[in-house]
Amino acid sequence: QSVLTQPPSVSGAPGQRVTISCTGSSSNIGAGYDVHWYQQLPGTAPKLLIYANDNRPSGVPDRFSGSKSGPSASLAITGLQAEDEADYYCQSYDTSLSGYVFGSGTKVTVL
Amino acid sequence: EVQLLESGGGLVQPGGSLRLSCAASGFTFSTYAMTWVRQAPGKGLEWVSGISGSGGSTWYGASVKGRFSISRDNSKNTLYLQMNSLRAEDTAVYYCAKFRGSGSHHYYRMDVWGQGTTVTVSS
């Protein structure tokens, strides 16, 4: 059971907008710790997609955006493309566990 | 180019030991904290362990504390994970990753990842 809860899957047609939620608690996201998002394409290592809630590393398209409010965070993908089919994970720090925690992961399918 | 290359994975019997290595290049290794993350077959990501740039601070996930030990050799630009008392549930792809961030390590993100090395614990 992951500390951070994500929907198992989301889907959308090319060009549409999809969002992925990441729900935590007062010991992690709600405690003010940053949320980071990773994209894992099939058969590859994860890649940093969004850091510190709403920042994009160099090279990440601006179709990807992040936000955080209270004990939750969201990743939005606008203008969905076939190459966005992947698993997406949120990550934060949990003070009760004294360690880093990942969300359960969300599979994005482009219809 | 920043690169991380893991090695040392393989098949080991329950109760056995294994040491993973992660060779780093393209950045000043000693400046950055590093971490290990694993992914069991068909499952999500699980944080395993982390270490500060100097090696003076180490952190462990609850499932491996007391069995795994993280270390680094800054003269060789290499990160290690010593895994003892291995269990079937330790079977996973193990990734090393570079931490990045400022201030408290609680806010670190994993900005560069290796390709992973596979550990299988089975009799």
Image (tube, coloured by chain):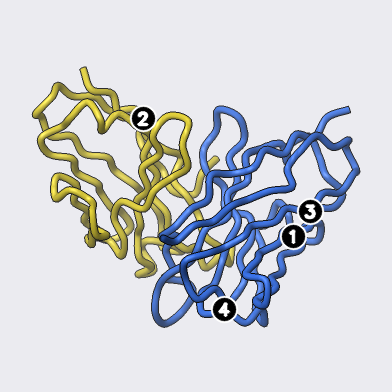
Chain colours: A yellow, B blue
- Estimate the spatial distance between the alpha carbons at disc 1 and disc 4, rounded to whole Å: 24 Å
Mark 1, secondary structure of its residue: loop
Q: Work out whether residue B80 can be spotted.
A: yes
Out of B75 and A75, give the one closest to the viewer: B75
Mark 3 touches mark 4? (CB < 8 Å): no
Q: Which residue carries the number 2 mark?
A: A107
In front of the other: B81 or A74: B81
Point out residue B88 in the picture as x, y percentages from the top left corner: 78, 34
Would residue B92 appear left or right of A7 to someone viewing this image? right
State the mark number for residue B65: 1
Q: CA distance from mark 3 to mark 2?
A: 32 Å
Label 1 vs label 3, nearer the camera: 3
Q: Percent position (x, y) of residue A72?
A: 30, 53
> Label 4 crowding class (10 Å Cα cut-off): few <14, some 14-19, many 20+?
some
Say above or below: B57 vs A7: below
Residue B19's tag is: 3
Residue closer to the observer: B47 or A39: A39
Do badges 1 and 4 share one subunit?
Answer: yes
3 or 4: tag closer to the N-terminus: 3
- Image vertical order of residue A71 relative to residue B31, above or below: above
Which amino acid does the dot numbered 2 rest on?
Lys
Name the chain letter of the residue that bears numbered label 1: B
Quarter occupied by residue B10 = top right
The quarter of the picture where the N terminus of chain A appears is top right
Task: Identify the residue shown where x is 75% and y is 34%.
Answer: B120
User: Given contact means CB atoms under 8 Å apart, are the residues at marks 1 and 4 in contact?
Assistant: no
A71 shown above or below B92: below
On what subunit does the disc labeled 3 rest? B
Mark 3–mark 2 CB contact (< 8 Å): no
Three-letter code, disc 1: Lys
Q: CA distance from mark 3 to mark 4?
A: 20 Å
